[in-house]
Image (cartoon, rainbow, N blue to C red):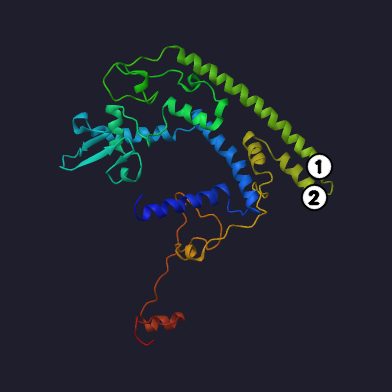
Amino acid sequence: MHGHHTNNFSEVNVRIFKDIVLSRNKAYNAVALVDFICTSMEEYYTRRLRNFVNGRHDTARLLFEDQLSRSANITKDLIESIGDNLYKVINEHGLSDFYEVNTAVGYCSCIKGKFGSFCKHQAAVFNFYKDKMPNLPAISSETRYLLAKLAFGDAVQEKEFYMPLVPNITHNLSESEIAYDCLPSTSTSNTIECPDDTVINDNINMNLEIIQNENLAKEYKEKICSLISNNFSKYQSTSLPILSKCIQRLENVKTATGWDSFLATAGSSISLRHRSRASIRVQPTTISRRKPGITRGSQRLPVGRPVTGIKKKKILKRKRNLQENVNLNIPNAKSHGTNH
């Protein structure tokens, strides 16, 4: 990290902790904050790691495939091994410059790779030399096993549990050299074809998933009925007009889509998050650096792509036309620096 990237990296870490982890809420004291980090945050990251190692997130695989496709024009002749985990990648556009890749620390001298990101030059080096690096996306079964061991400790499953059902193993490579599974290979060597049992395994997995979803839906229905009956017995002061309106809305449900909409919007005015704590304040200097249109308070800042269709009203300057401004009953425009 050099220059402003160090400051940006630290600010992003603090913002993630305040916005996502704490939801802009203050803990009552230091003991409550430590207890929250050691309990709720621990469970949160355990769930995230479990979903990743079980193959429910394809972000790492898609990132690797994207950089691998970008490096399609980089051939093995353009890569030279210097030694000590150093490689020189010549520019594929025919220029005289080159990029230096250090696989030991995950560094590349290009604009994207010099700050630790996984770039196409590192993808090309890994594709031809199979040299592992620390910033390589976690796409191998070995990496998934290590992450699962980090999350579950001694209760982790066997290493074979995180292996793919139908691995696509390329010939002339030992097991230790294979760093990713079930990805399209760019080499011309022969590969083992997937057996015919793939369709049978897919059908079995699909049937098991359907049975699990049905059991889970049954549990949810029983819990909804139980919560409704408990609330009726707990809050007996519900007025008749409210009950009548609820019955009318239930009678208006005629289709499955309407029933789904009723279930999804029931109690929509009640917040899903508990916000009884005080908000984490923002420093005045941070507020002064914000762009116009962004909240000046302590709410979470909107992230991601802005909503399309919402057009800002353009502020038009007043014309320097005395007669027109008199007719419109507005002050006449003045030239900057005169009559002030």
Circle 1 SS class? helix
Instruction: Please give the label number shown on residue 41.
Output: none
Give the position of the C terminus as an image quadrant.
bottom left
Q: Nearer the viewer, residue 65 or 125?
A: 125
User: Residue 71: percent from the left, percent from the top?
Assistant: 27, 34
Dot 2: few (<14), some (14–19), or many (≥20) neighbours within 10 Å? few
Question: Of the residues under marks 1 and 2, which one precedes in the sequence?
Answer: 1
Instruction: Please give the label number shown on residue 232.
Output: 1
- Name the residue at the bottom extreme: 339
Splitting the image into 4 quarters, where does residue 75 fall? top left
User: Residue 338: percent from the left, percent from the top?
Assistant: 34, 85
Q: Nearer the viewer, residue 162 or 272?
A: 162
Q: CA distance from mark 1 to mark 2?
A: 15 Å
Circle 2 SS class? helix
Q: Which residue is mark 2?
A: 241
Q: Amino acid at mark 2?
A: Pro
Please say if 187 is above or below 102. Answer: above
Dot 1: few (<14), some (14–19), or many (≥20) neighbours within 10 Å? few
Q: Are marks 1 and 2 in contact (CB under 8 Å)?
A: no
